Amino acid sequence: MSFAGSERRVNRELREVLDELVEHVRYVARNVKAMSQQDLEYAEERLEWLADEVWRTASEAEQQKG
């Protein structure tokens, strides 16, 4: 995934979204056993949204380059 790695360094928006995604995954991993079903569902929705944002941000950056 060299594109994301190099792009992450120069694209502030992508870096911020990736950092938020990683923070969310770490939070869920630490707390999954204590989370209610509703919390787990919300966490999954947020994860999907963040992944979509990463994809959108990375795609937009690539389109602007090309």
Image (cartoon, helix red, strand yellow):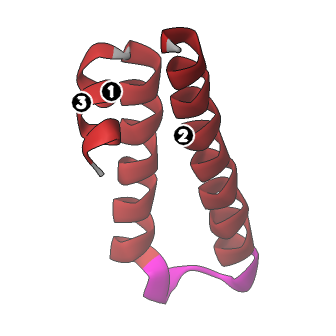
- What residue is shown at x 56% (from left), y 10% (from top)? 64
SS at mark 1? Answer: helix
> Residue 47, how many percent across, how many down?
60, 58
> Does residue 47 lie above or below 40 as drawn?
above
Q: Are marks 3 and 1 in contact (CB under 8 Å)?
A: yes
User: Within the image, what quadrant is residue 8 found in?
Assistant: top left
> Residue 37, how many percent across, how many down?
72, 84
User: Within the image, what quadrant is residue 24 found in?
Assistant: bottom left
Q: CA distance from mark 2 to mark 3?
A: 14 Å
| Numbered badge on residue 6 | 3
Residue type, label 3: Ser
> Could you classify mark 2 by the number of other residues whose Cα lies within 10 Å: few (under 14), some (14-19), or many (20 or more)?
many
Residue type, label 1: Glu
SS at mark 2? Answer: helix
Q: Are marks 2 and 3 in contact (CB under 8 Å)?
A: no
| Main secondary-structure element of the magenta-colored stretch | helix
SS at mark 3? Answer: helix
| Numbered badge on residue 54 | 2
> Does residue 25 lie above or below 13 as drawn?
below
> Does residue 46 lie above or below 30 as drawn?
above
| Numbered badge on residue 7 | 1
> Does residue 25 lie above or below 14 as drawn?
below
Q: CA distance from mark 2 to mark 1?
A: 11 Å
Q: Earlier in the sequence, mark 2 or mark 3?
A: 3
- What residue is shown at x 66% (from left), y 46% (from top)? 52
Report the mark closest to the observer, 2 or 1. 1
Residue type, label 2: Val
- What residue is shown at x 45% (from left), y 89% (from top)? 33
Report the mark closest to the observer, 2 or 3. 3
Residue range (magenta):
32-38
> Residue 43, how many percent across, how many down?
63, 65
Q: CA distance from mark 3 to mark 1?
A: 4 Å
